[in-house]
Image (cartoon, rainbow, N blue to C red):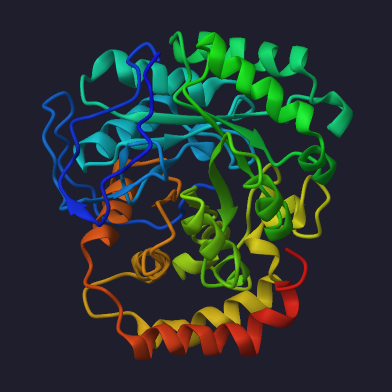
Amino acid sequence: MPVWPLDTTSGTRRGHEQQRGSKTHDNSQETSHPEEPSLHGTGGTLSGMHTRPFGRTGWQVSEVGFGAWGIGGRDWGGADEAEAMAALHAALDHGINLFDTADVYGDGRSERLIARLRRERSEPCYVATKAGRRLNPHTAAGYTAENLEAFVDRSLANLEVESLDLLQLHCPPTDVYYRPEVFESLDRLVTKGKLCGYGVSVERVEEALHAVDYPGVQSVQIIFNAFRLRPAELFFEVAQRKRVAVIARVPLASGLLSGRFARDTEFPAADHRAFNRDGAGFDRGETFSGVDYEAGLAAVERLRPLVPPGATLAQFALRWILSFEAVSCVIPGARRGDQVAANAAASDLPPLDAATLAAVQEIYDDAIRPLVHQRW
């Protein structure tokens, strides 16, 4: 089992790092861009991808990762396998080396597609998967050592590895963070060699703050975008002090921040953007970041003038997230290679100036803060 060093390289670097965890070891983006030629199987890199240290793990990860919820086909209207594999190959082509998935994305389909990618490509990469949402009912009492190990074993089989790079608890009930025995069971799985390390994916800032009190927690995945700024107020400072990696999820607010939606946009019935706006399926904050749809559309129109020439609104939204040093990686989803290319290009955009950052904050304070700030 690989041993994670205590120290990491600081700063942001350009280029695809040739290191990985053990070889045995939100939200799909809806923007559309022209197709680009693929370098499948060549190991080439098409974009100037920057990397960042991933907490205290010793990893250097691409600052733009790949969110694999969409290719699992669940809650996004499905994904063709050939198209999904093309998107995964494109991620490696463009220097992306962190893939975020979960055992419930397509009932393991997303994990199995990533396993296929690793069979077909030799580039080093890291896979962060998640567990816990298979519980029915999804209660804190279900987070037993036996259940967690069973979930891990299933992901090991799906990903065709002997040890998971990173296991994340998948937005567990808040009470889980007050059960030390849950984290002790994860420590034992690290000792057994089934995990290289573990982290959490959270709904609320309060959960993130409590999670990092456990010394074994290496990472926190949290919703952070121009419509969800609360993590930057306190949590980011704490995460940096404790050298915990931060994965920014739902970076485009379920596509709202792509700028492609209108009042009359229709979503398939199986798409969470159709059925979960009021939290009917799962936490409301997962859909459009909890923002009222029409209020979000209005705020998007105020953001458009801030987008620099040559960039899309989606790329601007990703670049804005990367303005925060505490963020280790942002994980927009993609189901096509052209979407991956567009996401990756955000890494090479020039930094946003102070006036632009202040303008985004002003729009949030005026139009979005009253809707979401204290809820999550």
Q: Relative to 79, is 151 above or below? A: above
Note whether residue 139 is visible.
no
Nearest the viewer among 74 and 112 is 112
Q: Relative to 59, is 193 above or below? A: above
Where's residue 130, x and y in %? Answer: 59, 31
Q: Determine the image quadrant of residue 151.
A: top right
Where's residue 313, x and y in %? Answer: 38, 71
Where's residue 351, x and y in %? Answer: 26, 74
Which residue is drawn at the image coordinates 66% and 36% (left, top)?
Answer: 170
Q: Relative to 31, is 24 above or below? A: above
Nearest the viewer among 217 and 46 is 217
Which residue is drawn at the image coordinates 11% and 35% (left, top)?
Answer: 44
Q: Relative to 286, is 228 above or below? A: below
Which residue is drawn at the image coordinates 30% and 13% (left, top)?
Answer: 119
355 with respect to 347 (left or right): right
Where's residue 236, x and y in %? Answer: 53, 63
- The quarter in which the C terminus is drawn is bottom right
